[in-house]
Every structure is written in C-alpha cells, then in structure tokens.
C-alpha cells in the first residue's frame, strides 16, 4: 500500500513540475514574441531613418558639387585678376623707378650746376 501512496505523490509532483515548466515556457514564448515585435518595429524605424538620411546625403552631394564648380570658377577669376594686378604692380614699380631716377638726376644736376648768388 505504501507503494501506491508514493507512486501517487510522485505523479502529483511530476504534474506540478510539468505545469510549472509549461508556464515558464509559455512566459518565455510570449516574451520572445514581444521582443520580436519590438525588434521588427525598430528595424522598420531604422530603415525609414536610413532612407531619410539617404535623401539628405544626396542633397549634400549636389550642394557640394555646386560648391566645387563655383570654387573652380572663382579660381579662374582670381587668376585673371592676379594677371591684371601684376601688370598694374609692374607699372607701379616702373613709375617708382622713374621717380627715383629723376630725384637722383636732380640732385646730381644741383651738385654739378654752378651756383648763382
């Protein structure tokens, strides 16, 4: 008789253990389903963010291309201005040289010419 009581309590213990494990399994499964939903939502949000950033990157690339073109044009203009400026600078140096030469010629003339009192 004792064997029947022990066998019965073992069966009840096994049933309780199985019930506890099923509940744990169900809880873990529902948690995994929730996590999968969150992961899917995050993935979709990240995809939308990447798409919006792609447009921003494209727009920035276009603006950069325009900027590079503008800088190239301005470089050509600066080169032309520098050439004209160098011509003006050369003329300025030539005028200064003429003034200095005239000054020295005047000083020399004053030393060589006789003085009248």
Image (cartoon, rainbow, N blue to C red):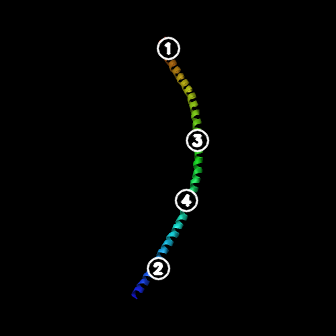
Image quadrant in which you'd find residue 83: top right
The x, y position of residue 35, in whole percent, is 52, 65
Which residue ends up furthest to the left in the rendered image? 2
As measured in the structure, the alpha-carbon distance from the residue carrying label 2 to the one carrying label 4 is 41 Å
Q: Which mark is residue 67?
A: 3
Label 4: few (<14), some or many (≥20) within 10 Å? Answer: few
As measured in the structure, the alpha-carbon distance from the residue carrying label 3 to the one carrying label 1 is 61 Å
Residue under the image location 59 percent in, 44 percent down: 63
Residue under the image location 46 percent in, 79 percent down: 15
Residue under the image location 57 percent in, 40 percent down: 68
Q: Secondary structure at mark 2?
A: helix
Q: Quadrant of the N terminus?
A: bottom left
Tell me the residue that label 2 is attached to: 15
Q: Nearer the viewer, residue 98 or 74?
A: 74
Image quadrant in which you'd find residue 37: bottom right
Q: Secondary structure at mark 4?
A: helix
Q: Which mark is residue 43?
A: 4
Q: Are marks 3 and 1 in contact (CB under 8 Å)?
A: no
Residue 43, compared with residue 57, is above or below; it is below
Tell me the residue that label 1 is attached to: 109
Residue 116, compared with residue 98, is above or below; it is above
Nearer the observer: mark 1 or 4; the answer is: 4
Looking at the image, is mark 2 or mark 1 earlier in the sequence?
2
Label 2: few (<14), some or many (≥20) within 10 Å? Answer: few
The x, y position of residue 75, in whole percent, is 57, 34
The x, y position of residue 90, in whole percent, is 54, 24
As measured in the structure, the alpha-carbon distance from the residue carrying label 2 to the one carrying label 1 is 132 Å
Q: Nearer the viewer, residue 53 or 39?
A: 39
As measured in the structure, the alpha-carbon distance from the residue carrying label 3 to the one carrying label 4 is 35 Å
């Amino acid at each position: 008789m004792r064997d029947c009581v022990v066998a019965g309590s073992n069966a009840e213990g096994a049933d309780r253990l199985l019930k506890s494990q099923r509940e744990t399994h169900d809880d873990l499964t529902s948690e995994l389903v929730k996590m999968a939903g969150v992961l899917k939502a995050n993935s979709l949000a990240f995809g939308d963010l990447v798409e919006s950033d792609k447009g921003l990157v494209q727009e920035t690339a276009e603006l950069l291309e325009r900027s590079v073109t503008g800088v190239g044009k301005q470089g050509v203009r600066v080169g032309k201005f520098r050439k004209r400026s160098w011509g003006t600078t050369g003329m300025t140096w030539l005028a200064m040289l003429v003034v200095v030469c005239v000054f020295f010629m005047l000083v020399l003339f004053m030393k060589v010419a006789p003085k009248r009192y």
